[in-house]
Image (cartoon, rainbow, N blue to C red):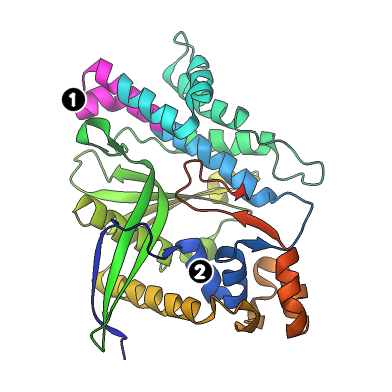
């Protein structure tokens, strides 16, 4: 039986409400102990190494954002009927917001007007990689600057957004690149009580679906060690895409039910045209939207039950070796309950939110 009789979604006006992003929701469902320790208490087991997969993925995502932005510079005048000066203002202001003033100036400085359009686009976008702070780790031969560079060049040669530009609204106040999502879900429960929670996130892109500019779809970039049928199938029902569609529909006041998942393998395989780059269209029907509302509330209730007593949260042991590596919290879970409180106090604190302007973790 469903726990609620009605749910509404509106733009958030009360930032003090409890907030949940997709990463946190998935982590709680994967294992409540892991999700609450990592994303409610913001704890990590002490470690000395770098999170190379996250770092490399973040570096590539900045190139993808720059690639989207440059298409506005190239095609904004013709596609949106903008005056050249206004198109440049939108390009400049969005670039400074995404990358910071000095870094963006370096990226613009990489554009050589004597080169062809592709060379200019690639030079601008790759400078986001070169200025982003990512550097090679001698223990990781796969996630290197060179491999990320090759991946990004192949991506830019494959995907042209001239007919599917990022959306521009309110004379450039809203641009569909790295779009923050912050909406409030209000549930009317079966007993008549009301519960309100925020859903937050950041969509990589919000683009027109085609040159007619009659419908929108979200863009989500993913980097993975391997692509294939199983990877593509994982997005058929992914709650991340559903949640972003719901959130952006509420923010814009228009229904969005389509998305495009853009996968790139790192490193690229030799035959990358076959299995190194993937384009997966996704769509959602009414029943899938309802499924997401059910899943969100179920997860929040699980979280609320154990958020103040993580030492008693369930251990989903089938997830201890997820993603082919052991969970970092196994030493915690395998310790006697009376020892766990002290272990939490000794853990490393690392706070992250998708609404941070840089989208990167920050230490506190």
Q: Which residue is mark 2?
A: 26
Secondary structure of the residue carrying numbered label 2: helix
Q: Find residue 289 and report its horizontal and vertical position in percent.
A: 29, 70
- Against 110, is 95 above or below? below
Most distant residue in the top direction: 114
Residue 281 in which image quadrant: bottom left
Give the quarter of the figure containing the N terminus: bottom left
Q: Find residue 265 and report its horizontal and vertical position in percent.
A: 59, 49
- Against 119, is 143 above or below? below
Q: Which residue is mark 1?
A: 81
What residue lies at 45% left-to-right and 32% top-to-bottom?
A: 67
What residue lies at 66% left-to-right and 82% top-to-bottom?
A: 317
Is there any visible trace of residue 155 in the rendered image? no
Is there any visible trace of residue 140 in the rendered image? yes
Residue 349 in which image quadrant: bottom right
Instruction: Please state if 58 lies on the left or on the right of 96 as rendered.
Output: right
All told, the count of numbered labels is 2
């Amino acid at each position: 039986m469903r726990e609620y009789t009605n749910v509404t979604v509106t733009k958030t006006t009360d930032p003090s409400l409890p907030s949940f992003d997709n990463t946190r929701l998935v982590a709680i469902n994967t294992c409540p102990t892991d999700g609450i320790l990592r994303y409610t208490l913001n704890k990590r087991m002490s470690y000395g190494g770098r999170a190379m997969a996250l770092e490399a993925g973040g570096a590539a995502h900045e190139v993808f954002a720059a690639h989207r932005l440059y298409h506005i510079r190239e095609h904004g005048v013709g596609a949106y009927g903008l005056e050249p000066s206004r198109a440049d203002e939108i390009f400049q202001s969005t670039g400074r917001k995404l990358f910071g003033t000095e870094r963006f100036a370096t990226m613009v400085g990489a554009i050589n007007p004597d080169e062809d359009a592709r060379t200019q686009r690639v030079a601008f976008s790759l400078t986001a990689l070169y200025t982003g702070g990512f550097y090679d780790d001698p223990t990781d031969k796969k996630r290197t600057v060179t491999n990320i560079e090759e991946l990004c060049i192949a991506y830019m040669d494959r995907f042209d957004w001239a007919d599917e530009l990022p959306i521009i609204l309110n004379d450039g106040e809203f641009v569909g690149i790295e779009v923050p999502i912050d909406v409030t879900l209000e549930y009317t429960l079966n007993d008549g009580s009301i519960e309100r929670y925020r859903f937050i996130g950041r969509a990589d892109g919000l683009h027109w679906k085609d040159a007619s500019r009659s419908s929108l779809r979200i863009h989500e970039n993913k980097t993975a060690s391997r692509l294939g049928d199983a990877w593509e199938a994982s997005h058929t029902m992914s709650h991340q895409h559903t949640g972003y569609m719901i959130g952006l529909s509420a923010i814009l006041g228009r229904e969005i039910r389509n998305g495009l998942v853009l996968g790139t393998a790192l490193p690229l395989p030799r035959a990358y045209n076959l299995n190194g780059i993937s384009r997966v269209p996704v769509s959602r029907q009414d029943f899938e939207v309802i499924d997401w509302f059910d899943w969100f509330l179920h997860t929040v209730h699980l979280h609320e039950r154990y958020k103040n007593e993580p030492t008693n949260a369930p251990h989903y042991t089938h997830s201890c070796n997820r993603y082919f590596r052991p969970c970092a919290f196994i030493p915690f879970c395998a310790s006697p309950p009376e020892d766990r409180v002290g272990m939490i106090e000794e853990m490393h604190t690392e706070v992250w939110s998708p609404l941070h302007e840089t989208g990167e973790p920050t230490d506190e």
